[in-house]
Amino acid sequence: EPEVTQTPSHQVTQMGQEVILRCVPISNHLYFYWYRQILGQKVEFLVSFYNNEISEKSEIFDDQFSVERPDGSNFTLKIRSTKLEDSAMYFCASSEWMGGETQYFGPGTRLLVL
Amino acid sequence: KQEVTQIPAALSVPEGENLVLNCSFTDSAIYNLQWFRQDPGKGLTSLLLIQSSQREQTSGRLNASLDKSSGRSTLYIAASQPGDSATYLCAVRANAGKSTFGDGTTLTVKP
């Protein structure tokens, strides 16, 4: 069964460093999302992406964050200058179309900012 | 702003029991509602998706219902097993795009 994959599974970085989290969505899906979950808290929406553009973003997704689909398979989340509070599990998701379809989530990248 | 609440926060039952998890949401203008399972430190596994026009969905021992007008959904698990122990998350898509998640219900099924 097709699945969303994410790399790395864990990343430790120093405050102020840039990190890039990578995702490979399901191949025929057109809509991509990033969510995060701070330890012990709710899963929170960050951004949705379609046709090489951001469709929607939350208040969390400030200028420190960016997303990109650099080729036909990868979808990346970049955090330009990490803060301690960026430590969280980051989930990538994809869906065939936006609205009524199931969102399929990847296994997550656990980011720890020291 | 959509708010999603799940009750109870935690539930412990003996193996074999049937149980109900509850999810409520404040904005009834939704596209769909999805139930997920999350094991500790792991990703989200989709269990059931209910479209806004549907009343329920079933998969094996799981049955999810949706009452959009009252802003409620339930997840019914029949004949619970220790392997069902996990956190169950409810997520509502109230527009074309993002999902809003509840805090989850942590289920423990004791052998």
Image (cartoon, coloured by chain):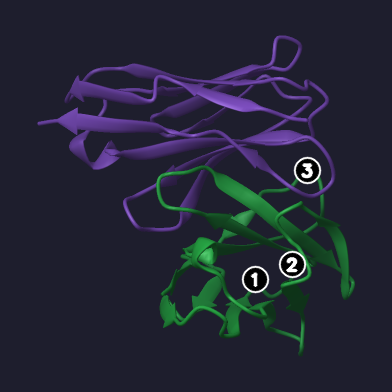
Chain colours: A green, B purple
- List x then y, in percent, for residue B51: 73, 32
Q: Is residue A74 left or right of residue B108?
A: right
- List x then y, in percent, for residue B45: 47, 51
Up the image or down, A19 lies above or below B63; here it is: below
Q: Are marks 2 and 1 in contact (CB under 8 Å)?
A: yes
Please, what secondary structure does the residue beneath circle 2 have? loop
Tell me the CA gap for discs 2 and 1.
6 Å
Q: Is residue B3 left or right of residue B104?
A: right
Please report the residue visible at 60 percent of the width from the left and 85 percent of the height from the top.
A18
Res. A89 visible in picture:
no
Numbered badge on residue A26: 1
The numbered mark, 3 or 1, whose residue comes first in the sequence reads 1
Which of A107/A56 is in front?
Answer: A56
Q: Quadrant of the C terminus of chain B?
A: top left
Callout 2, which amino acid? His
- Density class for disc 3 (Cα within 10 Å; few <14, some 14-19, many ≥20) is many
Q: Which residue is mark 3?
A: A100
Please report the residue visible at 76 percent of the width from the left and 52 percent of the height from the top.
A58
